[in-house]
Amino acid sequence: MTAFPTMYRYEIRDVLFDLDAAELISDLEDIGAIQFNPVEQHAWSVTITVNSVEPCGAVICDFWEGDCYNVDFREYNP
């Protein structure tokens, strides 16, 4: 298991919990997810921030028929 920095570890955990609970696209939109690839309709992203201000990365996934697949965390490099 990968350890995430403490400053956004809990936000990632909360996003993963919400993605697991999502059943509809509207559920993804409720947690702030956006479709990040217009060509691939199933690709979604949720931005992770430091103290709800500065973006530091994103949890990305494919959403298909009520389930998330290929979940990954991409950290932004300044």
Image (tube, rainbow, N blue to C red):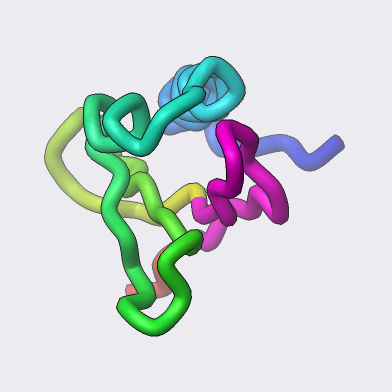
- Identify whether 45 is placed above or below 15: below
Name the residue rendered at 25%, 52% in the picture: 55
Look at the image and say whether residue 56 sits in the magenta stretch: no
Name the residue rendered at 50%, 24% in the picture: 23
Q: Main secondary structure of the magenta part?
A: strand
Query: Residue at the bottom extreme?
Result: 39
Look at the image and say whether residue 63 sits in the magenta stretch: yes
Quarter in which the C terminus is drawn: bottom left
Q: Quadrant of residue 17?
A: top right
- Identify whether 49 is placed above or below 26: below
Q: Position of residue 39 (x, y in %)?
A: 39, 83
Q: Is residue 7 visible?
A: no
The part of the chain drawn in magenta is 60-75
Q: Position of residue 7 (x, y in %)?
A: 42, 30
Q: Position of residue 44 (x, y in %)?
A: 42, 55
Q: Quadrant of residue 53?
A: top left
Nearer the observer, 53 or 22: 22
Q: Position of residue 12 (x, y in %)?
A: 50, 31
Name the residue rendered at 18%, 48% in the picture: 54
Query: Residue at the right extreme?
Result: 1
Left or right, 3 with respect to 45, comes to right
Query: Residue at the front extreme?
Result: 65
Q: Quadrant of residue 67?
A: top right
Left or right, 1 with respect to 63, comes to right
- Identify whether 74 is placed above or below 48: below
Name the residue rendered at 47%, 20% in the picture: 18
Nearer the observer, 1 or 61: 61
Q: Is residue 6 visible?
A: yes
